[in-house]
């Protein structure tokens, strides 16, 4: 069973920054458009896993309106690693962040990495 491994989350004050990483098998990473998703805490309204950003094999990117201008997705194809640089963090960014292919595959969901932004 293949799972992607996310890391880099933590607790940060509003306005701070974090950089998330996602390690993926080369068999997936070399051909796939990759994406970051997040799921807000259970008590938050609209607790569904939402698409944050995605990046194609050749580096084209697209972002959710809520993170545009603050987050940057990137990938290192030599290391099979996906990144998410998050700046100017807001309390509403608090969530568990996951990586997956753009059309997510159930078997690839990992444990995610918790990001908590305090006000």
Image (cartoon, rainbow, N blue to C red):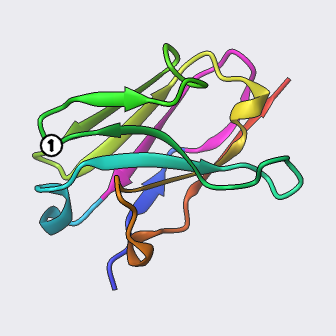
Q: Residue furthest bottom?
A: 1
Residue drawn at x 48%, y 51% as measured from the top left: 7
Quadrant in which the N terminus appears? bottom left
Q: Which residue is mark 1?
A: 57
Residue 53: percent from left, percent from top? 43, 36
Q: How many marks?
A: 1
Magenta-span inclusion, residue 13:
yes
Magenta-span inclusion, residue 111:
no
Residue drawn at x 84%, y 47% as measured from the top left: 45
Q: Is residue 112 left or right of residue 108?
A: right
Q: Which residues are magenta?
A: 9-23
Residue 47 vertical position relative to residue 117 in the rendered view, above or below: below
Q: Is residue 117 left or right of residue 97?
A: right
Near-viewer residue (97 or 101): 101
Residue drawn at x 13%, y 45% as measured from the top left: 77
Q: Residue furthest right?
A: 43
Rendering quarter of residue 15: top right
Q: Is the residue marked by circle 1 packed among few (<14), some (14-19), or many (20+) residues within 10 Å?
A: some
């Amino acid at each position: 069973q293949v799972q992607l491994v996310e890391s880099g989350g933590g607790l940060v004050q509003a306005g701070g920054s974090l950089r998330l990483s996602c390690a993926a098998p080369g068999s997936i990473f070399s051909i796939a458009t990759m994406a970051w998703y997040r799921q807000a805490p259970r008590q938050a309204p609209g607790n569904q896993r939402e698409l944050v950003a995605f990046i194609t094999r050749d580096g084209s990117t697209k972002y959710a309106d809520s993170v545009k201008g603050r987050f940057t997705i990137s990938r290192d194809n030599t290391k099979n690693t996906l990144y998410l640089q998050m700046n100017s963090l807001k309390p509403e960014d608090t969530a568990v962040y996951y990586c997956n292919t753009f059309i997510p595959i159930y078997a690839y969901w990992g444990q995610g990495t918790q990001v908590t932004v305090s006000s």
